[in-house]
Image: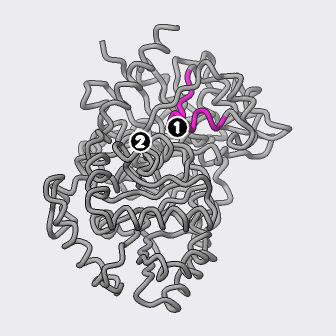
Amino acid sequence: MMPRVLFATAELAPVASVGGLASAAAGLVGELRRQGVDVVVALPDYSGVELEGEHRFSVDVPVWAGPASVRVGRHPVVGELHLVDVPGIARTHPYLAHDGHGWHDNDVRFLAFSAAVAALWRDVDADVLHLNDWHTASALGALDTTPPSVLSIHNLAYQGTCDGRWLSRLGPHAGAYEWWGACNPLKGGLLLADAVVAVSPTYAREIVEPAGGFGLHNVLRSRASSLHGILNGIDTTVWDPRTDAHLRVTYGPDDLAAKAVARRELLSELALRDDGAPLAVMVTRLTEQKGTDLLPGLVRFLDRLPLRLAVLGAGEAGTAAALHQAVGEHPGSVAFVEGYDEGLSHRLFAAGDLLLMPSRFEPCGLSQMQAMAYGTLPVVTDVGGLHDTVVDLDDDPRSGTGVVVARAAESDLVDGLHRAVRAVADPVRRATAQANGIAVDWSWRAPALAHLELYRDVIARR
């Protein structure tokens, strides 16, 4: 018998999409539903989302979190949605004000959303409550009896820590959220959930150590027997070069020569020199986590490698300014498009010879899987989900899929890019690595089945 799951998340692509959480939530929910699981999705009602056959009902929350209501209807892409409205949740961006800083009331917004999720749990008759990141983790504190529950960690760096006065409002299990006098929503969720999921096996091992635990390593270590590493997938109906509507010329694993067309067109689109040098691409948030602060220093090596670099991303203003400056100082070698453009992201993966992903930590990562599906070889650091998905082609020539470097450091990256440039210049090595990456099933099928098994386990244990 299939369980009924209440799945609460702050993001869900394409309805509310900021980072990897949105893609991961949408991919998992979609595949679970295809497997026959009844998934009730609770998402903040950020406003502006139209639903077919919509109706609304109120949910009973504490006075500080209300009034709260839920719009239920069908979204044309993701199917049935429960959009949760609490005071202040409707914003133009889920987390950030126009100045790029977090909304001043993010604590009350998402603690109220979590309180409404707890109330919704009482109404929907589900078997399992699946929470995602700190935005939903305090729901467990509001329930008299904690239900069979799973909490997924998509990025441990974000914990929602706020004023300790919130502890008097969270509910019967508020003590779990106390954190050195403050309130830490993620910490409480980690203690109360029946099972904790990290979004890759290596990330699950990293976060129980001081270097990767962001202060919560001891809490996670205490839950070691309940901590599971399940690698995310990608939506292979969207990320498929054989059917990609964003590409003028599509191609499959037996026709990779067509990548040359995509490459030639992109070089022209971005005003990069088409002189035979390999093209490295990046689709990324501009953050220290992603190692993008290393790019301005790396630019001076491009002509010596030789290599062309095309970056699509937004984030830290200093890095964006440095990349714009690099374009001016190295015309034809560097291209930078600030922001996010879905079509361009697909064209970059199709055109690239290499994907550069120098993350300092990476819970799972999606870009490396998307790139390999398009026959683009990733150059990555040996962390988290990158360790679990990319096999170094020098260490294992027969099974290699890309280049893995030890650290997010300029010297390591230059060395890794030298190795990658040599690899793509060798037709046999390149073709072998491309075939290896394309052959992997990057879909959500296996991750969804692993989650389904976990749901059944937490139900059985109750």
Q: Quadrant of the N terminus?
A: top left
Q: Which residues are magenta?
A: 195-207
Which picture quadrant has residue 242? bottom left
Q: Is residue 299 magenta?
A: no
374 relative to 201, above or below = below
The answer to whether residue 386 is above or below residue 424 is above
Q: Residue at x 18, y 52 (%)?
A: 253
Q: Mark 1 touching mark 2, by CB under 8 A?
A: yes
Which residue is found at the position 48% from the left and 67% from the top?
Answer: 418
Disc nearer the start of the sequence (1/2): 2
Q: Could you say which quadrant of the image residue 123 lies in?
A: top left
Q: Which residue is mark 1?
A: 132
The answer to whether residue 165 is left or right of residue 285 is right
**In the rendering, at what x and y percent does residue 424 appear?**
34, 64
Q: Which mark is residue 65?
A: none
Tell me the element at label 1.
strand
Q: Which residue is mark 2?
A: 25
Closer to us: 201 or 340: 201
